[in-house]
Image (tube, rainbow, N blue to C red):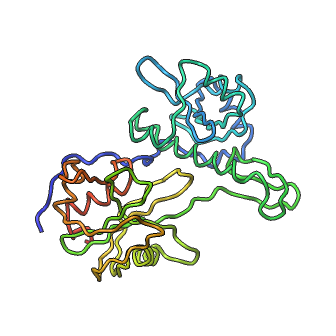
Amino acid sequence: MPSIDLGPMPRLGYSDNPLDRAAERREDSAAIAALAEDPRSRSYAVAGEFVVLRRNGADLDPLYPLRELQQLGVATETAFLGLLDGVGRFAVALEPAAAAALKAQSQTQFTDLRSIAVQGLVAPEHLAPLAEAKALLNWHTRHRFCANCGAPTQSINAGWRRDCPVCKAQHFPRTDPVVIMLAVSGERCLLGRQGRFAPGMWSCLAGFVEPGEAVEQAVRRETLEEAGIVCGRVVYFASQPWPFPMSLMIGCHAEALSEEIIVDRTELEDVRWFARTDVAAMLRRAHPEGIATPPPVAIAHHIIRAWVEHGERVFG
C-alpha cells in the first residue's frame, strides 16, 4: 500500500498545554492570593459562551491583567489555571455588568472558542489554556448546587473543587470521555455526516463512552449502532481536550469486519465508504464534489490524515 505525502502536519487544537498546573498550590490559599496580587499575573476572561479578546494593534490578545478584570466588577468565578515561567494564570467568569463594560469598549472582541481556534485569532499556545479555562468555568456554572442534597455549593481549592456546607459532599470537575474513530477496510474508510455539519463536510464517527465500558468496546458499539459496521481490532491514535463543553476526545482506528452500511438516521444524516485517494483530495480541499474533512483544529482531521498517509500501518 503506497504512502501519500500531504506535507507538514498541522498542530492539533487545544492540546499541548504549556502551563504547569501546580496542583500542590491549590489548597494553599495564601500562595494563590500572592499569585493573584502579583502584577505580572494574567487571566483569560470568559463571558458566558464567549472569550473576551483585547485588540493590540492588528493582533488579538486573550490575556488581561488580573487586577484590571477585578476593577470591572465582581467575577462570578475565578479559578487558578497554573503557572507559566512562575507567573500565575487565572480564568475569570465575568458577571453581566462587567461583561457589558468590556463589550462597550472598542478595543475588545467577544468570540467563541471554536472560531478562535479555526480562524487562528490568537497564538496557538493560548488554545489549550483557553480550553482549560472554558471547561472549568462551565463546570462551575453547572454545579452551583449539591447533587447530593441540593444546597448551594462553595468554590474552594482555587476553583478546583466545590464543597457543600450542609451535607459536606465534595464535588470535583469532570471530563466526559468520547471515542472518535475511523473504521478502515483496506483502501477505504468510513465517514459520516451530521445535519449540523458545514455543507460538504464528512468526519469520523464518535460517541460517549458509557459507564462500565472500555474504550475499545465503545468504539465497536458506536460504529455498529451508527453505521451497522462490525469492527475487530481497535488501535489508539491520540487524544484531544474538547471544551464543548468539557469532553476528552479519544481518537482510534478500527478494523472493519463487515461492509454493509445501516445508517442510524436519528444520529447521522448519512454514512459512506470513501476511497483513500478521495479522502486525500478531501484533506487537500481539492475534491471535485466539493466535499472535505474537518479542519486541522479537530482530532478527526488528524485521525483521517494518519490513515491516508500511512494506510493500514496505523494498526502497527
Q: Quadrant of residue 188?
A: bottom left
Q: Position of residue 218 (x, y in %)?
A: 46, 74
Residue at 26% from the left image edge and 53% from the top image edge: 291
Q: Residue furthest left?
A: 2
Q: Position of residue 307 (x, y in %)?
A: 24, 63
Residues 273 and 27: in front is 273
**Number of marks drawn:** 0
Q: Quadrant of residue 236?
A: bottom left
Residue at 62% from the left image edge and 59% from the top image edge: 174
Q: Position of residue 295 (x, y in %)?
A: 34, 48
Residue at 47% from the left image edge and 45% from the top image edge: 17
Q: Quadrant of residue 275?
A: bottom left
- Residue 53 vertical placement versus 156 (above, below): above
Question: Horizontal placement of 252 versus 208: left or right?
Answer: left
- Residue 117 vertical placement versus 300 (above, below): above
Quarter of the image with the C terminus is: bottom left
Residue at 29% from the left image edge and 68% from the top image edge: 272
Question: Horizontal placement of 193 versus 67: left or right?
Answer: left
Residues 289 and 47: in front is 289
- Residue 63 vertical placement versus 269 (above, below): above
Q: Position of residue 117 (x, y in %)?
A: 42, 41
Quarter of the image with the N terminus is: bottom left
